[in-house]
Amino acid sequence: MASTAKTPITVCEVGPRDGFQMEDRFIPTDRKVEIVNGLLAAGLRRIQVTSFVSPRAVPQLADADAVMAAIDRPEGAVFSALVPNARGAERAAAASVHAMNVFCSASETHNRKNVNKPIGDTLEGFRDVAAIAQDAGIALTGGIATAFGCPFEGDVPVEQLVTMARFYRDELEIGHIGLGDTTGMATPKTVRAALGALREVVPDMHIGLHFHNTRGVGLANVMVGLEEGITYYDASIGGLGGCPFAAGATGNICTEDLVYLLEESGYETGVDLDALIAVSKKTEAVIGRNLPGQVMKAGPRLRLHPVDAVRTAAG
Ligand code: ZN
């Protein structure tokens, strides 16, 4: 008998980290907690809650410890946080995260701008983080930022992704890597090339994809990921976030739009779309501006309208 089971896809919500960190105005801690709890209530079980960076570097996330302490912890929830160094790892362990995420840019120029260190030194520095995570029994994942292009250097060679993936696997015993399209330069072609190269050299590694919708092709890139068998995608509620190199640009791919696409394509996310849309609208209210998400405006496709309710136009 043919199986009718849908393929489960993991949607990791990164808005509370990747999105919030782009907001200039400080979002009160209890508002952050409400949004995370809303995401959990909508069924999301993977959330990158915050970043344990220096509060001076990212004042918006200075309340990382307080947010982690206050959010709900429903069965099956997996909370991760970015951890740049040993100090951050100690804070993250004390805050009982389930996974620490280290990340390094694939381009030297971007990495220097970001952390003022060469790639080699950045990766070596993660050994301390790995030791702290291991002692605490906390999972560690490795991110590769600007994996599909760098705003300073242009194209990133796939060999660079392979080298970094190997370091994560062989030196830090990391099993899951995330490919970050930090400034929205990925295209279906570059995504396919990167996944093909990685599969050949590190076929045992689990890969997650992190797309930004800066140029409007985020979900097209997801379709390529799905064709290539990738079952893990980052997204942000309402498409929260932005791009430091493009004023007014959109942020990560939008969680509701991604969930809608996946569910309508026969995949299973475990997320209640209506509940998610409600969180998206709440997030708009909290940050005080409109978000770029599409499905939050139009609603699910079979949310039918009364025939007389709206003006119709031909064509
Ligand atoms: Zn990002």
Image (cartoon, rainbow, N blue to C red):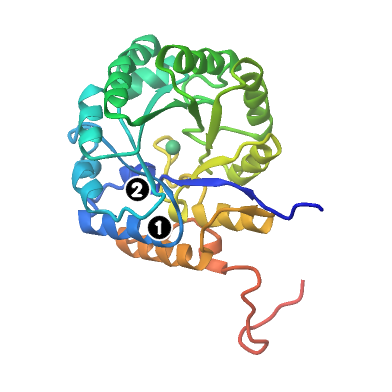
Rendered position, 26 above or below 230: below
Position of residue 297 in the picture relative to residue 56 (left or right): right
Secondary structure state at the residue bearing disc 1: helix
Which residue is nearer to you in this view: 240 or 65?
A: 65
Q: Quadrant of ligand 1?
A: top left
Disc 2 marks which residue? Answer: 16
Amino acid identity at mark 2: Pro
Q: Residue 12: x and y, percent?
A: 46, 45
Residue 37: x, y in percent? 33, 58
Where residue 104 is drawn, which disc sits there?
none
Question: Of the residues shown, which amino acid type is indicated by label 1?
Answer: Leu
Which secondary structure lies at badge 2? helix
Q: Is 105 positioned to the left or the right of 266 in the image?
A: left
Residue 201 seen by the camera: yes
Q: Decide: is 280 above or below 184.
A: below
- In the rendered image, the quadrant that contains the C terminus is bottom right
Left or right of residue 104: residue 197: right
Residue 108 position in % (x across, y down): 42, 15
Q: For marks 1 and 2, give the one nearer the viewer.
A: 1
- Quarter of the rendering containing residue 118: top left
**Of marks 1 and 2, which one's residue comes earlier in the chain?**
2
Residue reaching furthest front? 1
Alpha-carbon span between mark 1 and mark 2: 10 Å
CB under 8 Å between discs 1 and 2: yes
Disc 2 residue crowd, few under 14, some 14–19, many 20+, Cα 10 Å: many
> Is residue 81 positioned above or below 2 on the image?
above
- For the point 45% across and 39% down, the residue is 246
**At 22% across and 58% down in the image, what residue appears?**
30
Q: Disc 1 beta carbon < 8 A from ligand 1?
A: no
Q: Is mark 2 within 8 Å of ligand 1?
A: no
